Amino acid sequence: MATGSGLILRKSSSAFARWLCTTAKPVPTAKKRSLVFHKVSRLPQSSKTAIVDFLDNWVSEGNSIARSDLTSLISYYRNRNKYHLALQLFDWMEKSKLEIKNSDQAVCIDILYKTKGLASAEKYFNSLQDSEKTHKTFGAILNSYCNAKAFHKALETFEMMKESNYAVTLNYNNMLTLYHKMDRPEKVVSLVQEMEVKRIALNIYTYNLLINSYAALENFDAAEEVLEKMKSNNVECSLFTCGNLATIYVNRGLFEKANHFLEMMEKMENRWDEFGFGSLRTRLKLYSDMNDLSGVKRAWESLKSTYRTPNSTGYLFMLVALSKLGDQETLEKLFKEWETVCSAYDFRLPNVLLKFYLRRDMIEEATALYEKLVNKGMNPNLSTFTLLANLFIKKGQVDSALKYLATGVDKAKQKKREFLISEETIKLILNYFEENRDENGAEKFIDSMRKIDGLNSSVCDSLLSKIRASNRAIDS
């Protein structure tokens, strides 16, 4: 990103998603409606027809289903990213001739985009009557165009919406986000200026996009002046906004400026917003990026005082920060603490410690950790297999290293995932064969890597040529 900060898009990839939720309550209040919601939400999701079959049977038995039952369930599944199930419910609504409101049609456009793609969403929008093409359905198709980066269609739709007075804050934010994704910060600035001229309200999302755009244009004074604009318009500077500015300055090496906003975040700890845990995570990362161990520890104490027992993700971010700063004593202490409180063993955490040892050639410590995990009967994740291959290569046990890589490949196939062998691992193994002039071992390794596209041909040929040349020189 030209902005140098990924915070905005991690916070909300789509401003539209929050607004597009139906207004129905999560759980209907009437007795039969509650029963419908309860039964449908607990149906097996593996079945492609379970929901439709249940609804058909329910009605055939003389029961009624209200529109609010279905809109609540649609919202329930959308909130859990089960868009294909939400679409089944909407299709059933249409088939059953239940009232379809404009807000339902807007939701349908969003669901179609996420399940069947832009063309399907566009076809549905075009099929609507002119009277049904309101600010809600226009907003839904605009959001789809923006998410798909269909710039010309998005711009054309947006101009039509402005002509119909449909272009409110949300729609402007969608276009601003599109310009942001396309690395067009100057367009973000000009569009925000248009909003100000037209007296269209700017919200916290708009202001953060503007901050990032000024930063991308290297206009840091203007980026900070946005805070004054927020204050004058009664938009509170949030933890997220401070973290956004701190990230921008850390990425540019302006640590003094970054510290100012990190200190602001510390003072705002008693004013939790929706960014919540993310602000502490941001502080951990930024302090570690600045090699500020005391800052990392302060952020960790804040997290512990707030959450009492942090979850595995909290421990993970702290371990990564300590590993980066080289604080072995605290790293090991915190890892042991996590092991005593974790409810489920998350291999991302021992991987941090294992990687720390291996990069410092601390073979005994890495071996001890490995043996401990084996004795506990743990089931490593895919990244662990690469780290174990590194360990055994460093110990000179190439057969064991290749065994772990092969196991990783098999596990990946079972999970239908790609097994990515790190460049570091490849380099370690190639160096081992070269140093030992092991032509047969190199050929065996290369054959196994070719089967999973682990090496390109030029690397293979170069390696074998070097080993053969080295062997010929010694033989002669």
Image: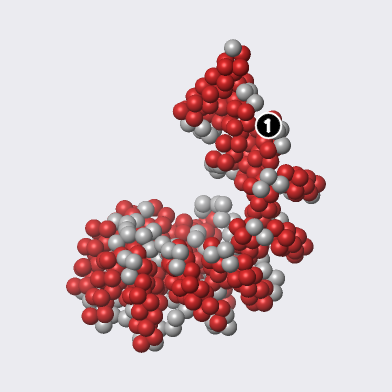
- Residue 242 rendering spot, x and y as whole percentages: 47, 75
Amino acid bearing label 1: Val
Q: Is residue 243 above or below residue 358?
A: below
Q: Which of the pair 161/273 is nearer the observer?
A: 273
Picture colour scheme: secondary structure
Q: Quadrant of the N terminus?
A: bottom left
Q: Is residue 452 above or below residue 359?
A: above
- Residue 75 rendering spot, x and y as whole percentages: 48, 68
The residue located at (24%, 75%) in the rendering is: 194
Q: Which of the pair 92/199 is nearer the observer?
A: 199
- Residue 460 rendering spot, x and y as whole percentages: 51, 27
Q: Which of the pair 139/53 is nearer the observer?
A: 139
Q: Is residue 418 above or below residue 142?
A: above
Q: Which of the pair 152/10 is nearer the observer?
A: 10
Disc 1 crowd rating (10 Å Cα; few below 14, some 14-19, many 20+) is many
**Do we see residue 259 in this rendering?**
yes
Find the residue positioned furthest to the left.
163
The residue located at (71%, 37%) in the rendering is: 395
The residue located at (40%, 83%) in the rendering is: 235
The residue located at (68%, 41%) in the rendering is: 391
Q: Quadrant of the C terminus?
A: top right
Residue 442: image quadrant is top right
Q: Which residue is mark 1?
A: 398
Q: Is residue 434 above or below residue 1?
A: above
In the image, is 317 to the left or to the right of 345?
left
- Residue 76 rendering spot, x and y as whole percentages: 51, 67
Find the residue positioned furthest to the top.
476
In the image, is 69 to the left or to the right of 220?
right
Question: Could you say whether the residue bearing mark 1 is in a helix, strand or loop?
Answer: helix
